[in-house]
Structures are given as structure tokens and as C-alpha cells.
Image: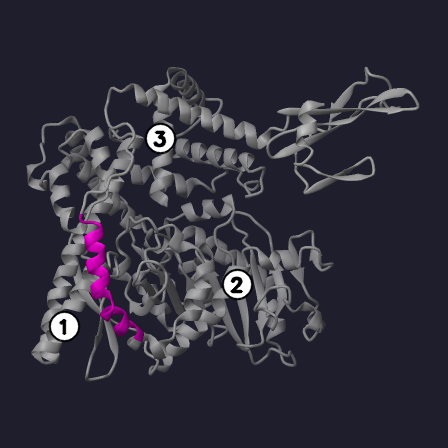
Amino acid sequence: SVWFLFYSILIVSYAFELLIWAAVLVNKIVAFLRGPCFFGRSSARDKVHRYEILVGNFLRCLSLCYCFKKGGKNIKNRGELRDAAYALTDYVNNDTKMDIVFSDLYVGLKLLARIQKERRLDAMKHIASIAASFMSEEGDNDEGAEHVMNRESFLKSTLNKCSLRVMHSTRNMRSSVLTIQSKPLSEEYEVIERAILSNDNDNDRRALADGAHFVPHSVHIYHKIGHAVHDHPLCVHNATFAIPIDSLNDDRFYLKSIHGQESTKLIFASFLIGIHATVYAILADEVAKAIVISVRGTLSLEDVVVDLQCLPQELSEVGRKCDFEGSGHYCHSGILSRGKWMYEDIRKRRILHEVFSRGSPYENYDLVIVGHSLGAGCACILATMIRHKYPRLRCFAFEPPGCVYDEALCNFSESFITSFVRHDDIVPRLAPANADALRDEFFELLARVKIPKFKLFRDIRDIVNDDDLSRRNLAVLRATESTPRDTQYYQQLLTFRNERTEKDISNRSTSTKLYIPGKIIHLCDVNGDGSFYIPYWATRCEFNEIILSERMISDHSASPLVDILKNIRLDELYDSTKNHSMKFQNQFELIQDDNSHDQRRVVCFSTRQCGRNFVLSSIVTIAILLSFLVNNGCEFFYREAVVSRNGEKRNDPSTRIGFYGYEPLRCAAEGGCKGNNTVLEGARVCAPFPPAFEADGKFFNLFGSSRSMLTN
């Protein structure tokens, strides 16, 4: 989970802190990075420029580590990171130095996740009381009491943002869901009733069916479409693929190599990667009778740069060009630059003009634009820009960023954009306002801690039962009004708040809130294991808080959406949910019995002074070094063979052996191996083991001959 990765990084950081030689080395590296040769402090104009140089150098180092396989060649640090650097300096408020280290981040975020869980439990108790009164009014006393008990158990056991219980209204025979959302400018939650998608409603049924049908297009654009046309003659320099317009009826361009896409024809694809350029494809879906534009999400470092360009940009110029009212409306600046590039690329190539022209086999098809993650945001702005030419256009945004459009433009786009959000996915909640709220609550929480950090570290590593959650939080945190005001940290926090207020007043142009576009379908995982999802119509206010959970990263994966949307059956949804909630009573009691005793995990660094700290740090450091050595080395063993022919002995080409690979050796002399003093040279390639290899006309298993390699 994300917490395990976070904890692993913390362990490594402790190892480097405790080892003196490592600390000295890190200090030298930091001093070098802060110098003028790398960081550029002497040539930087201001703090934003210094952060711009730092972020650019960091991304270029990542691209070198990945050997440019994840992009990075187009990152020139010539202004494309300006918005990202400005957002970063504005977020951390660099004028005030907060006394925060990495261990504070881990402890604070884990504790904040526990506080969020406690608040959700309090809200669910309120939901349970509402459900009890609702059921007492609906049925007789005996049957109503049984339903109330099941409802309360079901609510208490669903520990997530969308804690819910299906309710059945006798007036319109439609199911609804009770959800909890954080109140604006408050740490409390409020209970909201939302409508579950109904099989009796044509719009609901069509929205879910179309989402299930078009989501594979947003998934396949990541890899499979590129692999399908990689060696095709029409794929020019692996950059673009386009079929001739007079070949639209040709059956050779179906994506038969992709499962489920045998009736989909590839018309055009662009594989260009840049700060403005993005990967997209134009497909002809003959099952849905639609031309589909699929936009890829974040996969390269250039995409990361676009994600970081999150400042709002006005759409007045774009609106005049694309015939829609853009004055006073704002969009994510990085997404807008990608949308404008796709708009110009499609217009110059005249692809849609030719596809929908008279006489084309697709002239009566609909136009659909889909995308996932960053691609979903780009799909939304592209749909808004070309909608005046294609009024029947529809857009499906799967797990889009939470900062695409301003609220007014989001309301305008509800007629043609449908967004899908999965459970606790963090990306649809990553808006600047949500990040600011998380930062402020995090700083406030650290000021309320009343026990030493090493004790708090042990406490947050222990498993906490729901019934014991409130007591455990009170044991480590002060009440807000009891927070000491005379500490150095609290004085830093007050200064930070004052500077934050001044910046918010001065930056009114960049304080425009951005939201998820269009109508939103929230896929709520009831069990928490991905076995049962309920789709309901959500509002943008339900995503105004970043939920800290173990699955906030995994819920953003695109591939599971295909099966999730495919397996939802609206005609069986109400009965399945009702039966599911009735079965939960005994299961909840069993969970309570299992967790009644105190469970503890292995806790490292539980005391300040302990010899085990140094031992553990040494083991971790040695393990990391050995892992690099073992994975990349192939010189642990040496196999040498001597061949005797007609009384003459000569060296046979030998091999160096590693744990995961081998390096073949060859004779350095041009005439081959002669005599016993032959000089051998390596191929300088550590190749992976083949299943078997052939030597002297016989077939030997490589692992079976390892003993002879060690003894010869």
C-alpha cells in the first residue's frame, strides 16, 4: 500500500541519518546541488525561478535514470515549468521556514488519516440515527427494528468516504444513497441523499452502458494501440499513423490484435510526446456507430510537467476562436495547452472533416471523446472547443483531475460531459483548494501533538479498533483550544497563517476554484474489496477533501474500470444491495470479535537510544547496496573450459555468471583462442539467462551445469 512505501522510505532515511558517513555524503551532495553549477542560485532572479531550475533538474535526472524510456527529452526548462514552480512556492509559502522533517510527514499524515476516519464514524452514527427513524416510519415495529439493526451494522462496517445504505422510496420506487461530505470551511461532515442510477431511467441506463463500452478505448491508448501499429508501413517514424481517406472501407485496419476491439478501426494516431503534444487516436467504433477520439493520460515525464501546470487560465481567447462564451471562465493551464494543440493538429490534418464528409462510410456516426486521468481533462477541453461544429458530441472523462473547469463552466458542460470517479481515487480530489486545506490541517495537527514523536510513531503503527479510535486519538492529541501558544513551532504556524492570508488576498486572479467537469458518476465500493460497486450521481462538493487511505493511489488505475463498469447491472442493483446489507449483521459481529484484542505490528525505532537502530540501519543499507549489485552484476562466478584436440590444448570461450544474468567472453585476438595464455574480453552485456544453451553440439540446461562452472 501507499503507507508501506511511505514507511519504507522513512526507514531508509533513518538509516542515512544514523550513519555518520552517509550523513556527511548527503551534506556534500546537498551543498553541491545548492551551488551555482547545478541549482543556479546565483543566476536565479527570484525564489520562483530557483524552484523552476530545481524542478527541471530533478525531472532531467529522473529521465536519465530511466534512460529516457519515460520521456524527458523535451524538458528544456525554458519556461514550461514556471507555473509549476509558482504553484509549488505558493503552496509551501517559502517565506516562512516550518520546522518539518520527513518523519513529521509520515507521522502527521498517518495521524490525519486516523482523524478523518474518526470524523466519518461520527457522521455515520448520525446516518444510522436517520436510518432508524426512517425505517420506524416505513414498517411495523418488529420488522423495522430488524432492518434498523442491519442498517446500523452495515453503516458502521463501511469505513470509507461514501458510507452508504440503500433506501427505497415508496413514492417513486427509486433507490437512493446517503453519503457524507465535508462541509466547506469546516472539519465536520454533513449527510446528503443522492440518487442511485436506475434501470427505469433512460439517461441513467445509457450513461452507464456508454461508459462501460467506451472505457476500453481510454485504456488501450496507453500501450496496446501503439504496439498494434508499431511495425506498420503507415506508421511514420513511430510518430504518426494515418490511413488514406480512400481506404476507410479497407478491412486491414481493424484492431484485431486487441481483445474486444475486433470491430474497431484505427483511422489516425499520433504518438508525439512533448509539453504541448500528446498521444491520441481517432477510431471508428462500428458497434457503437461512433467516431472515438481517445486521449492518453499521464505516462511520461512531459505529462507530469503538464499536470504541475495547474494555475487557472482564462478562456476568452479560446472562446472567441471556437465560438463559445469563454470570458470569465477558467481552465487548468496545462490541460488547456494540450487541448489547443490537439485542436490545431486535427484541424490542419482535416481528419474529422474527411471522416464526416458526404459519401464517407461514417458520415452518420456520432462523435465521442474519451480519456483517463490527464487525458480525461484534455478530452473535456477538446470537446468544449469543437462542440459548436458537432452538436451531438459526447465526452466521457474517466477519473479526471479535480481542477479542470471553474464551477460555471462545469455546470455548462453537464449536457455533454460525463465523469466517472472510483471510490477514494486521489486524482479527482487533487485541487489546489483541497491541497491547501490538507496542508493547513496537517500543520494544525502537528501543533496539537502532546507526546514525544517516538511514542507517537509506535501508536500510529498499532492497529486501532473502531470503538477505541476516539480514545486513542485523545491520548495523543490535545484539544484545539488547549494547544500551547508559546512554542516555537506555533509561532511559525501563526506567521505562516498571516502570510497565507496576505497571499490569498493578493492572488485573487489565481484563486479561482477549479472542479471536476460535467455530471459525475461515483462508483462506491461497498465491501472495500472491489466485489460490489454502487454507481450514484454525485456533486462536485463531495470531492472537496483529499481522503488519506491505503487505496487512494490504486483506485486511479485505469484497467480495473473496464471490469467494474461491465459488471454493474442496474436491473439487479437494488435487490443485490438489499440482500448484501441483510447479510452484513453476522459478518460485522465476527469482525468485532476478531479485533477485540490489541494487535501490534513490528515497530522500529521505538526508543531514542538503542543499539538495534544502528544494526537495523546497517542491514537496510547493505541490503540496498547488495540488491543493486545482484540485479546488475554478472561477474560472481567464472566458467573456464579447456578443449584438447589431437594432443593440443586450447581455451574454449568462457562465461562470467551472475545471479540473474551472464556475460559471454570471447578471444581478444583476431585469430581466435590459441594456447593457454589467450586473453579473453567480455561482451560488456549482462544478458538474462536463457532457458538452455548449446555447447559442443550438445544441449545443456544452464542451471544444471552450474556445478561444473564453479569447479572448472
Q: Which residues are magenta?
A: 576-596
Nearer to us in this view, 315 or 306: 306
Q: Label 3 vs label 2: CA separation?
A: 41 Å
Lower position in the chain sequence, tag 1 or tag 3: 3
Count the marks: 3
Identify whether 699 is placed above or below 313. Answer: above
Instruction: Name which residue type carries label 2.
Output: Ser
Q: Label 1 vs label 3: CA separation?
A: 49 Å
Q: Can residue 79 be seen by looking at this rendering?
A: yes
Instruction: Name which residue type carries label 3.
Output: Ile
Name the residue beneath numbered marker 1.
Answer: 146
Name the residue beneath numbered marker 2.
Answer: 294
Q: Are marks 2 and 1 in contact (CB under 8 Å)?
A: no
Instruction: Name which residue type carries label 1.
Output: Glu
Q: Can residue 385 be seen by looking at this rendering?
A: no
SS state under label 3: helix
Q: Is residue 685 left or right of residue 541?
A: right
